[in-house]
Image: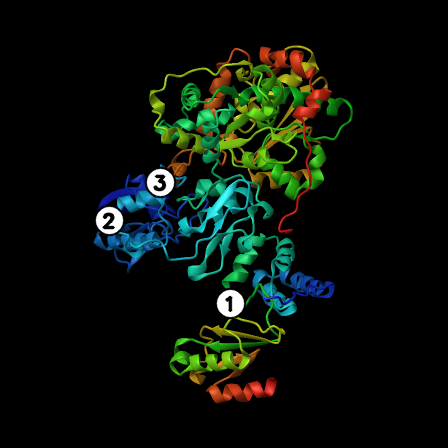
Amino acid sequence: MSLKINITEEKIARLFEVMEKNKRKPGPLMPTLHEAQKIFGCIPIEVQKIIAKELNESVAKINGVVTFYGNFSIEPKGETIINVCLGTACYVRGSQSVLDAFADELHLKPGETSEDGKFTLQSTRCIGACGLAPIFTVNEAVYGNSSVSKVKEILAKIL
Amino acid sequence: MDNYVSVFIDGKPIAVPAGTSVLKAADMAGVRIPRLCFLKGIHEEGNCRVCVVKIEGQRGLKPSCRTIVTDGMSIITDNKEIYDSVSTNLEMLAGNHKFECWKCSRETSCEFLDLLRRFSVDNRFSEDGYKHKEIRINDTSKAIVIDSSKCVMCGRCVSACEKYTGLGILNFNQRGSKTFVGPAQFHSLEDAGCIYCGKCIQSCPTGAIHEKDEIKSLERVFRDKSKTVVVQVAPAVRAALGEEFGYKIGSNVEGQMFAALKALGIHEIIDTNFAADLTIMEEGTEFINRLKNGGVLPMFTSCSPGWINYIETYYPEYLDNLSTCKSPQQMAGALIKTYYSDKLGVKPQDIVSVSIMPCIAKKAEARRPEMGRENYRDVDIVLTTRELARLIRHRGIAFAELEPIKPFGKLAEYTGAAPIFGATGGVMEAALRTVTEILEGHSTPVEFTEVRGLDDIKEATYKVAGIDVNVAVVHGGRAIKTFLEMMKKGEKQYHFVEFMGCTGGCVNGGGQPIINAYTQEKVDVRALRAKVLYNIDANTPFRKSHESEAIKAIYTDFLGEPNSHKAHELLHTSYEKRGFYSK
C-alpha cells in the first residue's frame, strides 16, 4: 500500500496541544493516541517518536500499545472506514456474507485500503451491539439488522 | 514477632516476615517452586503460571510469586492438579518454541529446558516440526540478535531493559499469536537507541536474545594457515569464565583460561590488562593536562563502550567531556596491528586480532569505522566470555583439568591497577593511583576505597596538589541518567567521573556467564566477581600503572611519551552524536 502519510506542521501543533492537556491528567497515553489517530489517520513511527519524547516513554512502549489495539493503526487508512462485526452474535446471524458483499463491491479484502485512499474495509470483534446483529459501522455510524441488500443501499449513498 | 506470620508449606510450619510472597516463603523453607518469568526486582508480573501453588480454602491455583502470605496460610506446592497444570502450560510454551538446542547459545544455562526436564514434558503440539508462529529473527545489529522462535513471552527482557537502563528499547509488538518482542516494528537495534549492555540477554530464560555469534568466524580463521591469531583477554573474563565449567561464582581461573586458549591453538596470547595500564597513562595524562590548562571538566572516562553508546545517543552535549582515549580493547588492538606485528615480523593484514570480552557492546565497538587503518581492523573478532566457554566445550577441552599457565610476551604484563578496571570504581582508583603521584611528585596511597562498592553513584573528594578534586563513579544506565541530570542542575564542580554501562562494571557485563533467576536472587554476582579482581590487585607486586616495566618499555621503544603524536594517532579517538529511529 502506498498511501502517503501527511505529517504537517499544523497537525503536529494540534498533537502538542492534545498532549499538553493530557499531561496534566494521570494516564495521558491512551487519550493522546486516540487523538493522534484522528489527527493523522494513523500513528506511524514518526508520530510515535514525538509522543514518546513528550510523554517521556520509550518508542517501543508506545508502539507496543499502538500495535496491540485494533483501532490504532500504523498505516494510513481510508477516509471512510467500514467495520463489519464478526463477533459471535453477528457471525451466527450472517455477518460473514455482509463482509463478503463489501469486499465484492469495493474490490477489497478485509484489512485493505483502496488505492485512491477512499475506503478501508475491516472486520472487527464484538462491539457490544449484539441485539442489532448483524451490524457494521461506516466511520462512526452504526447500521444494525444488516444484510447484503443493505450493504448495496448504503454504498450507493456514499459512493 | 509482630511482623512475622506463620504459614504451612507442604504441612511444615515456618515463620516468615509479613508481606513475603509465597514463592519467597517457600524458598526460605527450602522448597524450590519452579518458576519461569520471575526475576527478582526486575520482573514480578506473574504471567507464566509456572510457579502456581494450591492455597487451602481458596479456589483454583495461585501464582506464588504474586500471592502474599497471610497468617495461618496452608500452601501446597506439589500435587497432581499443580503438576498437570504446570506441565500443560510448559507443553503449550514448548509447542511455540523452536528446539535447536545443539545450535543454541544457551547450551548449559537454559531455564526453559531445565523446566521441561523437571516436568518431563511431552511435545505433542510440534511433534512434526515447528510451524506454529511466524519466525522473526532481528539480526541487523552489530551485536545482538533477537530470535522470536525461541521466545516464551515471559517479558523478562522487556522489564530488564526498562529497569536496568531506563531506556525501554524492547517491548511487545502486536498481540495474540502474532506477538513478538523487539524494538518498535522490527526496527534494527542499531537505530533503536540500544546501548548493547546485554542485560536483556542475561535476563532471558531461553536463547531468544543472544550476542551475534562470532565463533564460526574464529573457526574459519583457525583453518586458514596463513593467518597468525593474536588473542587478548579482558580482566573480567577470568573472574567469571570458571562458572561455565562448574566453578563457584567468584573463582579466579586466569591460569586455566590461558591454558585453554593455548589448547585451542591460539598463536599469541596477550592481556587486555596491559592496555588497561596504558589507558591509565594516557587518560591520566589527559586529565592532568585538562586540570592544569583549563580544559573541559569534568572529564568522563571512555572505557565502557556501552556508556559511549549511551552518551552519544542521549547526552551528546557532553561529548567534549569524554576522554579521547580508546577503550583498552581498542588500544590493545591498535598495538597488535602495529607495534606487535613488527615484533612478530608479520604483516598486519596477516594477523587476526581476537578479543575475549565480558561485553556485548565491544562487538559493535570493534566495528566502528574509525577503529582501524589502511583497510584493516584493529580488532577483527570479538568473542564474549560465554562464546569462549562454548568454543572450549565444543573442542572437548577438559577445562578443570588444565594446568594453569602464564601468557607469554611483553603485552601480557600488568600491574594491580589493571584488573580492577573490570569492577565499578576500578578505572577511577587506578587513575587516582597514578594521577595523585604525578601531581604530588611523591609516593601516594595505593587504595582509594571510597570509590569501591556497589552503590549506584559514589562520590569522593581528594586533596591533590592543593586542589580539592571531586570524583564520582556511576554505573548502569539508570544511574547514568540520574547522575547527569543531577550534575546538570547542581552546583558541584566535578573533576573526574567514571561511567560504566553495566551495573557493577564489566564483571557483570552482558557477555558474562548467565546466572539463573534463582541464583541471581540469592547472591550478588557483581560483588563475588569483583572480589576476584581486587584479590588479584592486592597480590600483584606493582599496583600502579606507571610502575610497570612493560609500560615504560613501550613508551621508550615505540610511543615516545603519553599523549604524544603517535599515541594520539593510535590510542585516541573521537565521538559523534547519534540519533535513533532516524531511518
Residue at image point 65% right, 55% down: A54
**In the rendering, which numbered label is found on residue B172?**
none
Q: Is B520 above or below relative to B448?
A: below
Amino acid at the residue labelled 2: Asp
Q: Are marks 1 and 2 in contact (CB under 8 Å)?
A: no
Q: Which residue is mark 1?
A: A70
Regarding residue B251, the answer to whether it shows in the image is: yes
A150, above or below B249, in the image: below
Q: Chain of mark 2?
A: B
Secondary structure of the residue carrying tag 2 is loop
Residue under label 3, please give it.
B102
Mark 1 and mark 3 on one chain: no
Amino acid type, label 1 = Gly
Does the CB distance between marks 1 and 3 fall below 8 Å? no
Residues at discs 3 and 2 in contact (Cβ within 8 Å): no
The residues bearing labels 1 and 2 have C-alpha atoms spaced at a distance of 40 Å
x and y percent of residue B89 in the render?
A: 31, 54
Q: Which mark is residue B78?
A: 2
Q: Is residue B453 left or right of residue B461?
A: left
Marks 1 and 2: same chain? Answer: no
Find residue B329 and report its horizontal and vertical position in percent. Answer: 57, 27
Q: Nearer the viewer, residue A155 or B432?
A: A155
Q: State whether residue B446 appears in this view.
A: no
Q: Chain of mark 1?
A: A
**Is residue B139 rendered to the left or right of residue B119?**
right
Which of discs 1 and 2 lies nearer the camera? The answer is 1
Q: Where is residue A154 drawn, in percent x and y?
A: 55, 87
